Amino acid sequence: MAAHNELGKKGEALAITWLLEHGYEILYRNWRYTYVEVDIIATKEMVLHFVEVKSRSNNTFGYPEESVTEKKMENLMLAAEEFLFHFPQWKRIQYDVLSININNKGNVDYYLIEDIY
């Protein structure tokens, strides 16, 4: 497996742990609709969260959250619409980005950007 794929999987695992520690209930991980995917679908305080996880091991190419493009958001919203079609009971939703920096010493920094759209 390529190093960036391993980093992505590690980042998603760290994200799950972080979200659980901060009171979220994880409903789905890597929920797919055709060619689009939501990294994590979680709930907290009656709000459904569609969470995009971005991980980096250094900031050479910027912070992880800076790599969330307009196209990525469009795809996230497309997947969310399909999810809500299947599970229409959710009235309050939001889109979040969980940015994870893992440095070469193993230290991890988290930055949650809530309700980005």
Image: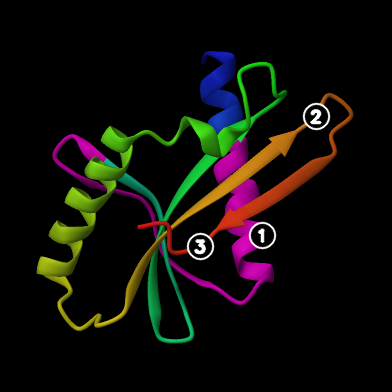
- The location of residue 46, given as percent across then percent down, is 40, 86
- Eye-nearest disc, 3 or 1: 3
| Residue 52 in the figure: left or right of residue 63 | left
Q: Residue at x 23, y 39 (%)?
A: 36
Question: Relative to 104, does residue 38 appear above or below in the rendering?
Answer: below
| Residue 36 in the figure: left or right of residue 68 | left
Q: Amino acid at mark 2?
A: Asn
From the image, tell me which residue sits under label 2. Answer: 103
**Is disc 2 placed on a helix, strand or loop?**
loop
| Residue 80 in the figure: left or right of residue 11 | left
Question: Relative to 26, does residue 44 appear above or below in the rendering?
Answer: below
**Hey, which quadrant is residue 56 in on the image?**
top right
Q: Residue at x 61, y 28 (%)?
A: 7
- Is residue 13 part of the magenta span, yes or no? yes
From the image, tell me which residue sits under label 1. Answer: 18
- The location of residue 15, given as percent across then percent down, is 60, 52
> Real-space Cα distance between discs 1 and 2?
17 Å
**Hey, which quadrant is residue 85 in on the image?**
bottom left
> Real-space Cα distance between discs 2 and 3?
23 Å
Q: Amino acid at mark 3?
A: Glu
From the image, tell me which residue sits under label 3. Answer: 114
Q: Which residues are magenta?
A: 10-36
Q: Residue at x 18, y 34 (%)?
A: 35
